[in-house]
Image: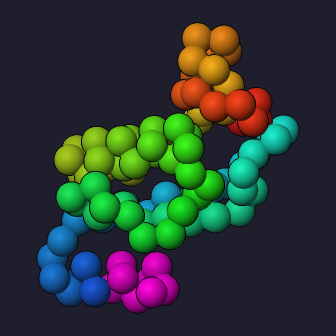
């Protein structure tokens, strides 16, 4: 299903959702241009590349939905604790 069709369907049903978009990457990343829709129940449509970074984005999207505000997040795809904002992973990109 097209993400924007799903967003329209959710809006018509008065259901909250978040649209996650990759806006910038540095270094090695699974995707450099992608979008993912996150529903209020945590289910998704599309992908921004999978792995720990996607899990982090889904979690942050849920918090944004609950707060009713948008947000921008940054994450390093490196082992947790190895770099600032590291979310786990082996790609090493940001």
- x then y, percent, for residue 51: 56, 44
- x then y, percent, for residue 60: 38, 41
Direction from residue 10 to residue 79 in the image, left or right: right
Q: Tell me, yes or no, if residue 71 can be seen here.
A: no
Q: Residue furthest right?
A: 27
Rendered-image quadrant of the C terminus: top right
Rendered-image quadrant of the N terminus: bottom left
Q: Tell me, yes or no, if residue 7 can be seen here.
A: yes
Residue in the picture at 23% in, 59% down: 40
Range covered by the magenta-colored residues: 1-8
Residue in the picture at 36% in, 79% down: 7
Question: Is 44 above or below relative to 84?
Answer: below
Question: Is 34 above or below relative to 4?
Answer: above
**Snapshot colouring:** rainbow
Question: Is 68 above or below relative to 46?
Answer: above
Residue in the picture at 15% in, 76% down: 14
Q: Please identify the dominant SS of the magenta region.
A: helix
Identify which residue, 49 or 21, lies in the foreground.
Answer: 49
- x then y, percent, for residue 81: 58, 11
- x then y, percent, for residue 86: 60, 23
Direction from residue 19 to residue 94 in the image, left or right: right
């Amino acid at each position: 299903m097209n993400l924007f069709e799903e967003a329209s369907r959710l809006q018509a049903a008065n259901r909250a959702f978040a649209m996650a978009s990759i806006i910038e990457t540095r270094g090695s990343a699974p995707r450099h241009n992608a979008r993912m829709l996150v529903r209020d129940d945590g289910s998704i449509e599309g992908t921004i590349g999978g792995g720990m970074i996607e899990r982090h984005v889904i979690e942050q999207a849920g918090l944004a939905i609950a707060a009713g505000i948008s947000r921008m997040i940054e994450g390093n795809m490196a082992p947790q604790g190895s770099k600032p904002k590291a979310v786990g992973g082996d790609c090493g990109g940001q």
